[in-house]
Amino acid sequence: MRQRSFDWALAKVVMPAATLLPQPDFADEQSDKQIELAQTFVRQMAAGDSEKAVQPFDETMTTAMPAKKLKQFWEGITNQHGSF
């Protein structure tokens, strides 16, 4: 049961980053940029810098997951399952 909970919790963190990944028909240059954005997001969150991590968010995403809420969520996951 704990593994299932972790999978769901991890999915909630990875999904915002995954939305930054390219669609299959994007040009390679765009793909590389999107991959870098996703990797940067995860690095910033792992470093505890949620303020920088949310900078690329649009208004809808910022409303849904502001920096403070994202930080609390990330800390909850790492407290339960260890550092990323």
Image (spheres, rainbow, N blue to C red):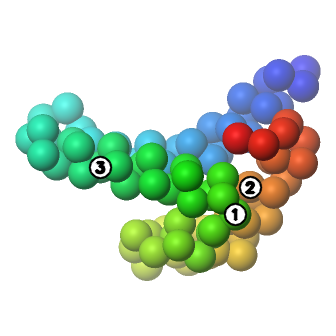
Q: Are marks 1 and 2 in contact (CB under 8 Å)?
A: yes
Identify the image quadrant of residue 5. Answer: top right
Label 3: which secondary element? helix
In this figure, which residue is indicated by the disc labeled 1?
48
Q: Residue at x 34, y 49 (%)?
A: 36
Label 2: which secondary element? helix
Q: Earlier in the sequence, mark 1 or mark 3?
A: 3
In this figure, which residue is indicated by the disc labeled 2?
74
Q: Amino acid at mark 3?
A: Gln
In this figure, which residue is indicated by the disc labeled 3?
34
Q: Are marks 3 and 2 in contact (CB under 8 Å)?
A: no
Label 1: which secondary element? loop
Q: Residue at x 16, y 48 (%)?
A: 30
State the image coordinates of residue 4 (x, y, percent, origin top left). 80, 24
Number of labelled discs?
3
Using the image as rendered, state which of residue 36 and residue 77 is in the foreground. Answer: 36
